[in-house]
Structures are given as structure tokens and as C-alpha cells.
Amino acid sequence: MWDWFSAPDYWAARFAVQHLLAIGYLVGFLSAARQFRGLLGERGLTPIPRFLAHVPFSQSPSLFYLHYSDRFFAGVSWAGVIGSLLALVVDRAPLWAWIVLWLVLWLLYLSIVNVGQIWYSFGWESLLLETGFLAIFLGPGSIEPPAPVLWLLCWLLFRVEFGAGLIKLRGDSCWRDFTALYYHHETQPMPGPLSRWFHRLPRPLHKVEVVANHGAQLVVPFLLFAPQPAATVAALIIVATQGWLMVSGNFAWLNLLTITLAFSAMGSWLLHWVTPDPPPPTDPPRWFVTAVLAVTVVFVVLSYWPVRNMLGQRQVMNRSFNKLHLGNTYGAFGSMTRTRYEVIFEGAADSGADWLEYEFKGKPGDPRRRPPQVAPYHLRLDWLMWFLAISPSYGRTWLPKLVEALLRNEAHVLRLLRHNPFPESPPMLVRAELYRYRFTTRAERRETGAYWMRSRVGDFLPPLALEDLE
């Protein structure tokens, strides 16, 4: 009687989705635990208590409206870490325990995102929440996977890929004349160790990459709903393209989650080689069937807004249409920057001393430093520094506080940086300079050992002392 509801051939697919998603949650909670004090803590750049005082619960539901302290936020983050580890190892728990575990993970991360302000405004935050909510209803390994939830995961993957493809095609002309990758690897928010190598590939190959990207995002997603083995082939193409993006740049856990979703379309004929054997089939209880069908109806209704956005003339990227971050629209790089600019902070012990440079963990700074591999971890301040170089307006809520933190040597903020040139006592002055960066040619790399060539453009912030801020 449950043939229409269960999908026994996708037991391995559910196993893969569950474990990869648990890793995504683990990275997300670790990122929150290790960075929140400097960004969002009581003495951070945009303190959560100030946010809670001005934004009502109805606009941003979160556990932190019940209570906030830095210690409580740390407890929520580390509880999420522990829960993520449990989700990695608890596969055949009772159904009720499975639902409680994944529901708690979702509620904890939703609470963080909804008070995270500009630091949590990235599309992969909503993607983690939407995927995590659907995972609540995937069920443990003791029951057969519910087909409606697998369809919803494929539908979410379709929106991620097709929405990203549409925004590119409608956006910057370089996607239509196939020249986008002339610039992308050099100007992306946070290049990785191999980004320079990708940038130096022959330009005809860059055009082939753009054509392949259009195919992977505008054509292949439709095959996710085709019969097997076509759906598995489509999923493998998406996995391959996302793997390409992972090794060519740092996009937090966006690629990991997209790969996670792709596994929901893969048949057991492929995955059974790398997953355990399923237990004897067990029919799900009627209340669970009812809950899954109710969730399916809700997501069908919520799909109206992202579909309208994709079909509309003014498509937007990475928009949540509700405070629960369900039924979102996704997309990236509808506009391509052609030139890379970086804001470089410097300090001086007094008005006549040398200016010494602050170094960030992930973003370009020292031209001789090789771009690091950061993803799937997310360095939030480094990403906002990329936006700051595009427009100072991105720093209006946090830039003055960052300058003050540097002038005071505030440890909780300085821990977000890689190098503080004033470890003993704070500088008297801090300034910010704007530089243009480009990858070195092969000859320049051999001659100088540098990965970047940079040239000063001008002042971004004049020399500032504490009294200037006051």
C-alpha cells in the first residue's frame, strides 16, 4: 500500500545526502562558533544585542530573543557542532529521534542566521536551512526513503542550478559572448590555490568552460526528473561542475551543498558500491506519511515566489521570501567584475613611523602569499572585504567599528585576522589604501616569486586616530 510513497531504490541516495548535509551543518556551526565574538558578540562589529533591541521577533525569529549572551551563543554553536556529529553517525535511530535531531539542528542554525545580519546574508546560508528542513522528513535508515522529499530535494537543486544559469544569461554580457572566465578566476571574492592556474588557461578553453557551464545550469537540471539512468547522469554532471568550482575558488559550503542535493537524484545502481546495504524494508507510520505530504503541499505553495522570480524580467539572486528561509531563490555572478581591487589596512605607531600592513586570513594581501584553500569553511569578514572594495556602502554598519578595534587592539576582532603587526601595543593611527591586484604572469612568477602584482590606486580611508572616531 506504500508503493506510491516509498522509494526503496534511493536508500543509498538518502544515506549520501544525510552524511554530506551533516558535514555542511558541522562546518556552518564551527564557522559560527569560531567567528561570532568578533563579528556579532557583545563587543563585536555588529552586536547582536543592538540588533535584538531594534528588530522584533516577528521579523527575524530566533532563540536569542529569549536570552542573549556571548556564552549562550557559544553554547548554541557548539551544541550544533555536537548535533552535526551525531547526525553523521546516527543513521538507524528511531524515527522520532531522527526528526528531533534534524529539527533541532535546523532551529539552532535558523536562530543564528536570523540574527547574523550582513555576515549571514549569503545564499548558502538559506540553502543550508532549506536543505536541512527537508532532511527532517527524509527519515532514518530503518525506513524506506519518502519519494516526495526526494522530489523536493531535486526541485531545490533545479532552482539552484537553473536560477544561477538564468541570472548569468540575463545579466552581464560577458556570459553571452563567452568571455566571463577571462575575469572570473582573478576577480572572484576569494581565490584559491589553483585560481591563478585556472586564470592562465588558454582563452579558447575559457570559452568552452562558459558554454559547458550554460549547459550544466540551463539544460542538465531538467534531466534530474527523467527516468534512470538519465537522472543519475545529470546528477553526475552537476557533481563534476561543482567539483570544478571547488578546486578553482572558495565559495564556502555552496558547492558542497549543491553536490549533496545532486545525490538525491542518483540511483542505487551507482551508489550501492560506496554505501552500506539497506536493512529489510519497513513501512513508514501513517502519521509520518501525513507529515511528509503536508510538507510537500507547503513547498508547492512556497515555490510560487521563486518560480515567479525566475520567470520575471527582473530576476534577483539569493532572496528569501520568508523569515524561515524556505522556498528561496538562488543564483550568483549575474554581474562580473573585470578588475580586482583590495582594501589594505595599515597602522603606524606614531605620525612619523612606518606604516605596517594587517593581513587577513583568506583575502589577497601580501602579493607573495599563495591564495589559501578555505572552503568549505567560511571567512565572513574576508568576504565582506571583497564587497567593500567594490563599494564603501557595504561597510557602513561595521567599518567604523573595525577601525576602532584595530586602534584599540581588541583581541576578539583581531582573532579574525591572520597577522597583527602591533602585538604588544595598539597603533596610534590606522588607514586603508585601495590597490589594484592581478595575477602574475609565468615570467613574473619566476622572477619575483609572487602570485599577485599590485599597484596603489589611492586612499580608501585617511589616517585615523581614536579621537577622530570620537
Image (cartoon, rainbow, N blue to C red):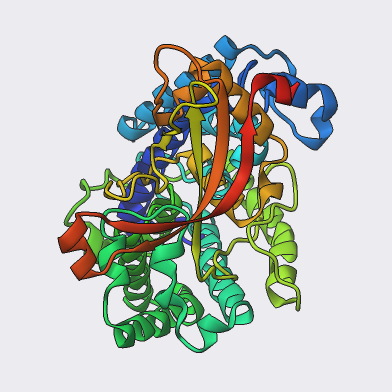
Q: Nearer the viewer, residue 436 or 230?
A: 436
- Does residue 16 show up? yes
Q: Position of residue 413 (x, y in %)?
A: 52, 23
Q: Nearer the viewer, residue 264 or 98?
A: 264
Q: Residue furthest front?
A: 352
Number of disc labels:
0
Residue 194 to residue 364: above or below: below
Taking the spot 69% from the left edge, 65% from the top edge, the residue there is: 316
Residue 245 to residue 149: above or below: below
Position of 80 with respect to 40 (left or right) is: left
Q: Position of residue 35 (x, y in %)?
A: 49, 27
Q: Position of residue 432 (x, y in %)?
A: 56, 40
Taking the spot 69% from the left edge, 64% from the top edge, the residue there is: 306
- Does residue 96 show up? no
- The quarter holding residue 437 reads bottom left
Q: Position of residue 199 (x, y in %)?
A: 32, 70
Position of 176 with respect to 60 (left or right) is: left
Taking the spot 44% from the left edge, 23% from the top edge, the residue there is: 415
Taking the spot 30% from the left edge, 31% from the top edge, the residue there is: 89
- The quarter holding residue 68 reads top right
